[in-house]
């Protein structure tokens, strides 16, 4: 199951790249048309805005899959092994509840906006709102997969719980590790 999800979410990453390129292309085209020809494409601005919204929601799916969402693990890191597992299950269950609420609320919005259309492109707003349902379902699937992963191998909890504050912290840890290794080599000589 994990391999199938990995392949699926790898395709999500490709989709994000394509959408980002389209968004940048539409904005760039509009800038060129406005600066050089004193005109523009109204629909391209609206489409770029909608692509940005889609990128945000689809990016949330990718961030959930790679455990990259912002979080505070200072308390959970200090818990014993079983405490980490319980806290993680509660966390994932809470996320599932919130995603269920998001699906329910978004469904109401989609039903109410079936007739409404975007001003310039004419895209039904229900299509635009439906990305929230897709995001909630995908994040819910990730939560369930994470719970199953921990049930199958409880030792993976440390890998799933630990977060990194920034890339700079990783660099500092690497430098400190290299300095320690170099110091040990000098002492052994």
Image (tube, helix red, strand yellow):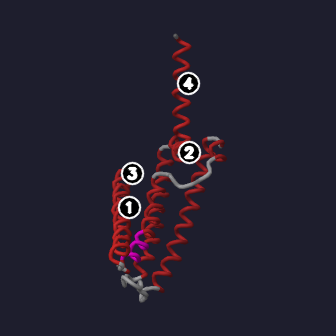
Residue at 44% over, 57% down: 62
Residue under numbered circle 4:
180
Which secondary structure lies at badge 4? helix
Could you say which is closer to the camera, residue 139 or residue 21? 21
The reply, left or right, for residue 187 in relation to residue 80 is: left
- Give the Cα separation between the discs numbered 4 and 3: 37 Å
Residue depth check, mark 4 versus mark 3: number of the one nearer the observer? 4
Residue depth check, mark 1 versus mark 3: number of the one nearer the observer? 1
Q: Is residue 177 magenta?
A: no
Q: Please provide the residue range marked out in magenta.
A: 44-51
Could you say which is closer to the camera, residue 98 or residue 113? 113
The reply, left or right, for residue 63 in relation to residue 120 is: right
Residue under numbered circle 1:
16
Residue 130's disc number: none
Name the image quarter holding residue 95.
bottom right
- Give the Cα separation between the discs numbered 4 and 1: 40 Å
Residue under numbered circle 3:
2
Could you say which is closer to the camera, residue 65 or residue 96? 65
Which secondary structure lies at badge 1? helix
Q: Please tell me which of labels 1 and 3 falls first in the chain.
A: 3
Q: Please tell me which of labels 2 and 1 falls first in the chain.
A: 1
The reply, left or right, for residue 124 in relation to residue 176 is: left
The reply, left or right, for residue 113 in relation to residue 77 is: left
Q: Please tell me which of labels 2 and 3 falls first in the chain.
A: 3
Callouts 4 and 1 close, C-beta under 8 Å: no
Name the image quarter holding residue 36.
bottom left
Residue at 50% over, 73% down: 103
């Amino acid at each position: 199951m994990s391999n199938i999800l990995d392949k699926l979410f790898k395709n999500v990453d490709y989709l994000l790249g394509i959408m980002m390129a389209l968004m940048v292309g539409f904005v760039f085209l509009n800038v060129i048309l406005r600066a050089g020809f004193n005109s523009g494409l109204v629909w391209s601005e609206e489409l770029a805005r909608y692509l940005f919204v889609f990128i945000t929601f689809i990016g949330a799916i990718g961030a959930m899959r790679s455990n990259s969402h912002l979080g505070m693990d200072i308390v959970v890191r200090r818990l014993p092994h079983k405490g980490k597992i319980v806290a993680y299950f509660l966390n994932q269950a809470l996320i599932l509840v919130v995603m269920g609420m998001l699906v329910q609320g978004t469904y109401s919005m989609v039903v109410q906006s079936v007739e409404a259309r975007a001003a310039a492109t004419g895209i039904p707003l229900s299509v635009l709102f439906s990305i929230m349902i897709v995001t909630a379902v995908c994040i819910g699937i990730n939560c369930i997969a994470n719970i199953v992963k921990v049930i199958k191998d409880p030792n993976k909890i440390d890998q799933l719980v630990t977060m990194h504050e920034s890339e700079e912290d990783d660099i500092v840890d690497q430098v400190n590790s290299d300095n320690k290794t170099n110091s040990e080599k000098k002492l052994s000589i």
